[in-house]
Image: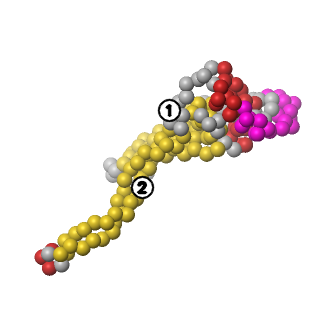
């Protein structure tokens, strides 16, 4: 955008209420097939009561409380439509700290079936240590879109790839120059595209 267009953008008024109303209308009227729910696996610690043998020759029993971990799947977001995504990936091998390291991140701007505008953050982190042990962590969270989240859609997201002596870095998560003439236009166009599908 030229400097005149940037100042036009800066002078524009951000009307989040209008965008939210439009999003509700799009959710009701779109004929596009919704994506299935997003889930994540969480670990829950339960307090449980156990019995054990005790005393001389184990002739009596006693009860005690302990904790146990169990995994369960939780829904993060119900059926939804993806309006925009960015990604970021890191691949490293044979660094001073570990044999291999991988990180994958995805951010999704979504509209759920209730008409809510949400931003989802999904990531997966894998490490292979020099001693052969491994560690994997991942998560998926969602929160209502903020003004900053919406305005990010008014910016360019170029895919970049570079590497150094430690690994490869690629993705398009970094917001660049402003490419829209007014605040919120990027989201408005994404919603319009969904409505027209």
Residue 116, percent from left and from top: 64, 39
SS at badge 2: strand
Camera-side residue of 97 and 189: 189
Residue 195, percent from left and from top: 66, 24
- Specify whether residue 154 is in view: no
Q: How many marks on residues?
A: 2
Residues under labels 1 and 2: Cα distance? 24 Å
Q: Is residue 143 magenta?
A: no
Q: Is residue 31 above or below residue 66?
A: above
Q: Is residue 48 above or below residue 133?
A: below
Write the residue at 37% across / 63% down: 47
Question: Which residue is under mark 2?
Answer: 44
Camera-side residue of 133 and 147: 147
Q: How many neighbours does mark 2 have within 10 angstroms: few (below 14), some (14-19), or many (20 or more)?
A: few
Residue 93, percent from left and from top: 43, 41
**Quadrant of the rendered structure where residue 149 is?**
top right
- Mark 1 or mark 2: which comes first in sequence? 1
Which residues are the magenta region?
Answer: 1-22
Write the residue at 49% across / 43% down: 75
24 left or right of 133 in image: right
Q: Is residue 21 magenta?
A: yes
Q: How many neighbours does mark 1 have within 10 angstroms: few (below 14), some (14-19), or many (20 or more)?
A: few
Q: Residue furthest left?
A: 57
Q: Is residue 141 above or below residue 113?
A: below
Residue 147, percent from left and from top: 73, 43
Question: Which residue is under mark 1?
Answer: 36
């Amino acid at each position: 955008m030229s400097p005149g267009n940037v100042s036009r953008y800066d002078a524009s008024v951000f009307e989040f209420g209008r965008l939210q109303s439009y999003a509700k209308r799009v959710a009701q009227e779109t004929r596009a097939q919704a994506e299935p729910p997003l889930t994540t696996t969480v670990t829950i610690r339960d307090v449980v009561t156990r019995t054990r043998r005790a005393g001389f020759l184990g002739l009596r029993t006693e009860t005690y409380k302990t904790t146990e971990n169990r995994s369960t799947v939780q829904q993060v977001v119900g059926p939804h439509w993806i309006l925009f995504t960015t990604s970021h990936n890191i691949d490293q091998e044979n660094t001073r700290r570990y044999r291999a390291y991988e990180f994958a991140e995805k951010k999704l701007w979504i509209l759920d079936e209730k008409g809510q505008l949400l931003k989802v953050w999904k990531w997966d982190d894998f490490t292979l240590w020099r001693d052969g042990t491994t560690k994997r962590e991942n998560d998926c969270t969602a929160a209502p879109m903020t003004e900053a989240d919406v305005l990010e859609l008014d910016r360019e997201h170029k895919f970049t790839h570079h590497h150094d002596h430690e690994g490869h870095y690629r993705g398009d998560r970094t917001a660049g120059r402003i490419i829209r003439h007014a605040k919120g236009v990027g989201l408005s166009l994404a919603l319009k595209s969904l409505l027209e599908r």
